[in-house]
Image: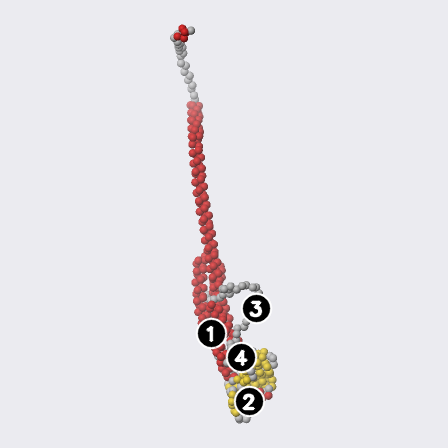
């Protein structure tokens, strides 16, 4: 056993001749195989790279997407801000336009009211711009038709033209107001001359109903110049209307006086006597006119007066028209200033054709010349 284990190893080498195999490939096939090998190699590299860098690629894609989203959000926010700003500007512009249009409308109403005053008072129109008295109406139409986009130039132009219109109208108003104030003061002076204790008060009309709207300061407010002129004109008109019922006019306009009021020599007896009126020279048939508005008290024969008409006026005044040739009114009839109430003649205690005219207050004879003189101030 031991001998076997210790025996030396021997090797046998068999040599065989090397056999070489030659494979001849067609160039196309060789090229195809090369392409396949390259493709496999590329695919292997790509898959290896994808496996290695997949997470990094995904992170880059997500980062680019997030950046694009942030840019889009910022742009959307900017556009929204632009829209809001534009909307705010448009709203402000519209509110500004509405405010200016309201102002122009008020100025238009004032201009029209001034023009109506000139027409109502029959004093002619105020000097207006070259476009004429209807310029205010046209300005109002232009103001209402102005578009918000053109409010700046249009409103400014209209405002300047209203300024010019108001200056002209207010200047005319001031002159007209002075004229009417002088007329009112003259009428008030007539009241003073006649000894009337008080001027006629403005009429107060009772309310007839309507919607209840609580009063607030500023309601119904109008321009001061128009309100002042309306007040003065109303006062003057009220005074004149009241004076129209006081005997101030001549019963025979243009006819001369032949005998005055007071003590005189009686034409029949030649002695001193009291003459209770005026004798006015007038040929037969001359119109005798009412010297104030009133009501016929009597119309017919009245002793020494002959044919006579007596009128009742306000404030206790009466007037008598005597020695008439004919009477053209009847008792109870209402007459106006200047109405014909009869024709002159020489009836009754008379020496010739004329009109005997009396003015009485509470049946006391007054000097008619005082009233006729006051009436001359009304012309």
The residue tagged 2 is: 352
Tell me the residue at 41%/14% (across/down): 19
Say which element carries label 3. Answer: loop
The residue tagged 3 is: 207
- Place of residue 87 in the rendered image (x, y in percent of width and height, measured from the top left): 47, 52
Query: Is disc 2 in contact with disc 3, using a CB cutoff of under 8 Å?
Result: no
Q: CA distance from mark 2 to mark 4?
A: 29 Å
Q: Nearer the viewer, mark 4 or mark 3?
A: 3
Q: Residues within 10 Å of mark 1 (few under 14, many from 20)?
A: some
Q: Which residue is mark 1?
A: 181
> Foreground: 274 or 152?
274
Looking at the picture, how far across and down is residue 276, in whole percent?
A: 54, 87
Task: Tell me the SS state at disc 1.
Answer: helix
Q: Where is residue 13 drawn, in percent x and y?
A: 39, 10
| Quarter residue 212 falls in | bottom right
Question: Within 10 angstroms of label 4, few (less than 14), some, or many (20 or more) residues?
Answer: many
For marks 2 and 4, give the one nearer the viewer.
4
Q: Which comes sooner in the sequence, label 2 or label 1? A: 1
Using residue 149 as the reference point, say whether residue 310 is left or right of it. right
Label pair 4/3, CB-CB below 8 angstroms: no
Q: Residue at x 49, y 82 (%)?
A: 373
Q: CA distance from mark 4 to mark 3?
A: 30 Å
Q: Quadrant of residue 355?
A: bottom right
In primary-sequence order, the first of circles 2 and 3 is 3
How packed mark 3 is, by other alpha carbons closer than 10 Å (few <14, some 14-19, many 20 or more), is: few
Label annotation for residue 246: 4
Quarter holding the N terminus is top left
The tag earlier along the polypeptide, 2 or 4, is 4
The first of marks 4 and 3 along the sequence is: 3
């Amino acid at each position: 056993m031991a001998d076997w284990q210790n025996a030396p190893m021997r090797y046998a080498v068999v040599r065989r001749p090397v056999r070489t195999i030659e494979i001849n490939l067609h160039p196309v096939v060789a090229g195809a195989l090369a392409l396949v090998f390259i493709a496999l190699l590329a695919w292997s590299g790509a898959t290896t790279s994808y496996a290695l860098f997949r997470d990094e690629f995904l992170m880059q894609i997500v980062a680019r997407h997030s950046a694009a989203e942030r840019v889009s959000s910022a742009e959307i926010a900017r556009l929204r801000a632009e829209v809001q700003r534009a909307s705010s500007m448009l709203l402000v512009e519209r509110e500004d336009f509405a405010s200016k249009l309201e102002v122009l409308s008020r100025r238009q109403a004032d201009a029209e009211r001034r023009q109506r005053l000139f027409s109502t008072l029959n004093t002619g129109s105020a000097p207006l711009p070259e476009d004429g008295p209807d310029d205010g109406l046209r300005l109002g139409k232009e103001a209402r038709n102005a578009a918000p986009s053109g409010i700046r130039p249009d409103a400014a132009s209209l405002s300047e033209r209203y300024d010019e219109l108001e200056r002209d109208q207010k200047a005319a108003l001031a002159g007209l107001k002075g004229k009417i104030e002088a007329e009112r003061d003259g009428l008030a002076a007539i009241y003073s001359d006649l000894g009337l204790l008080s001027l006629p008060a403005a009429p107060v009309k009772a309310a007839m109903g309507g919607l209840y709207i609580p009063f607030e300061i500023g309601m119904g407010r109008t321009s001061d110049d128009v309100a002042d002129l309306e007040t003065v004109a109303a006062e003057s008109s009220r005074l004149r209307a009241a004076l129209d019922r006081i005997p101030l006019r001549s019963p025979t306009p243009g006819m001369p006086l032949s005998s005055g009021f007071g003590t005189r020599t009686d034409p029949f007896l030649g002695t001193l006597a009291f003459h209770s009126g005026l004798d006015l020279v007038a040929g037969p048939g001359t119109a005798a006119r009412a010297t104030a508005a009133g009501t016929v008290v009597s119309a017919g024969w009245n002793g020494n007066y002959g044919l006579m008409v007596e009128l009742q006026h306000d404030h206790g005044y009466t007037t008598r028209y005597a020695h008439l040739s004919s009477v053209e009114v009847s008792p109870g009839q209402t007459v106006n200033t200047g109405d014909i109430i009869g024709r002159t003649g020489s009836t009754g205690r008379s020496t010739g054709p004329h009109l005997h005219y009396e003015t009485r207050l509470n049946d006391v004879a007054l000097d008619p010349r005082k009233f006729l003189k006051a009436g001359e101030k009304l012309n």
